[in-house]
Image (spheres, helix red, strand yellow):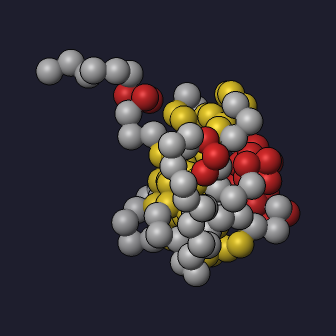
Amino acid sequence: MSPYVDPTEQLVTEIVVADIKRSTRFYVDLGFALLRDGGDFVELTWEEHRLFLAEVSAFRDASAEAPPRPKFPRANVRVMVPDVDACWERVKTLDAEIVLPIADRYYGLRDFTIADPDGFGIRFASVLRAR
């Protein structure tokens, strides 16, 4: 069966944020590209894959508030990079909250996880090479 849409359009994560400008700045500083800014809804990309950020006001028919910031991320999005150590050095200069420090993992990746301003996890990873 052929795909309904391009694979980069499937399983796109949308994160509800308290302050869209703060969150957009955070993700752009990490290396995401800003694709579209709709005010209270933003589309970001990483190698053609999209990530959505939205304030509650973007959901016109909802009467809700942004969820409280969790102590530990309820979920994370994994971003594969060719040099996770260089990414780790860049992230440390951004003063991001470190959830899991960089390390070689049993599942074949070298990775680390940080939290965005609303507590959503971003995990940067590189494939471990045979040593």
- Examine the image and state in which quarter residue 72 appears: bottom right
Q: Residue at x 27, y 20 (%)?
A: 4
Q: Residue at x 38, y 21 (%)?
A: 6
- Examine the image and state in which quarter residue 123 appears: bottom right
Q: What is the residue that sits farthest to the left in this orientation? A: 1
Q: Residue at x 74, y 55 (%)?
A: 19
Q: Is residue 41 visible?
A: yes
Residue 63 lies, with reference to residue 57, above or below; the image says: below
Q: What is the residue that sits farthest to the right in this orientation? A: 93
Q: Please provide percent x and percent y for residue 26.
A: 76, 53
Q: Nearer the viewer, residue 32 or 18?
A: 18
Q: Please provide percent x and percent y for residue 99.
A: 61, 75
Horizontal relation, residue 119 to residue 20: left or right: left
Q: Is residue 131 visible?
A: no
Residue 3 lies, with reference to residue 60, above or below; the image says: above
Q: Quadrant of the N terminus?
A: top left
Q: What is the residue that sits farthest to the bottom in this orientation? A: 71
Q: Nearer the viewer, residue 121 or 107?
A: 121
